[in-house]
Amino acid sequence: MVRLFAAIWITAMLAASSFASLILHIDQPLRDAELGEYLLYTGSITYTGENEVEIYGVGFHAPDGFLSDFQGHLNFDSMTPGSTYTGELFSVRIDDRTTYETHTASVNLVGHDKISNEIVSDSKLITVNFVPEPATMLALIPAIGLLLRRRQRGNGCNPVDKMGTI
């Protein structure tokens, strides 16, 4: 019974260790981008399988449509066992209608083992936080000041009246 268990366990471990995978790592963009501009993403792709893999490419899905015009930058269509690619992965355009908040999109890398036809893939989430450009923030400061002043006047409170007399 112990031998049967050991044989099953060793077979399972060998099967698990021979499983091929693509490992996708995405770096944050080096700069901020404004509406209508492109963000360039770099990173690395590592292939851990035993046979050559054909790469279908990098896919992209942004549910709320904040990023558009996805462009893959992979300049190869296959990877050999144990190889790693490091460099540009893709770029996306920030849609002009994007709201100033945090947005999330998924990035998928898909390929298949040329010998076993096994599909290999990896996916990652990217998060982009849009904040107003400095000129927009500077334009908001006077508006906030006016609102605070109006609020003070609106409730009949005058800071000089509250000081009291001696």
Image: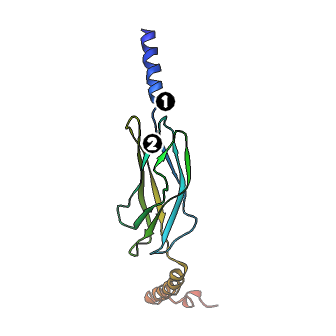
* Earlier-in-chain disc, 2 versus 1: 1
Q: Secondary structure at mark 2?
A: strand
Give the labeled residue for mark 1. Answer: 17
Question: How crowded is the residue under tag 1: few (<14 C-alpha within 10 Å), some, or many (20+)?
Answer: few
Q: Which quadrant of the rendered structure holds the C terminus?
A: bottom right
CA gap between label 2 and label 1 equals 17 Å
Q: Residue furthest top?
A: 1
Name the kind of residue labelled 2 in the image. Answer: Val
Horizontal side, residue 41 vs residue 98: left or right:
right
Q: Nearer the viewer, residue 138 or 75?
A: 75
Name the kind of residue labelled 1 in the image. Answer: Ser
Quarter-of-image position of residue 93: bottom left
Question: How crowded is the residue under tag 2: few (<14 C-alpha within 10 Å), some, or many (20+)?
Answer: many
Give the labeled residue for mark 2. Answer: 53
Image coordinates of residue 3 in percent, x first then y, are 45, 10
- Residue drawn at x 38%, y 37% is 118
Quarter-of-image position of residue 9: top left
Label 2 or label 1, whichever lies nearer to me, is 2
- Residue drawn at x 48%, y 73% is 37
Q: Which quadrant of the rendered structure holds the N terminus?
A: top left
- Residue drawn at x 43%, y 24% is 12
Q: Secondary structure at mark 1?
A: helix
Image coordinates of residue 8 in percent, x first then y, are 42, 18
- Residue drawn at x 54%, y 63% is 29
Q: Are marks 2 and 1 in contact (CB under 8 Å)?
A: no
Instruction: Say if 58 sits above or below 132 in the image.
Output: above
Instruction: Say if 67 sits above or below 158 in the image.
Output: above
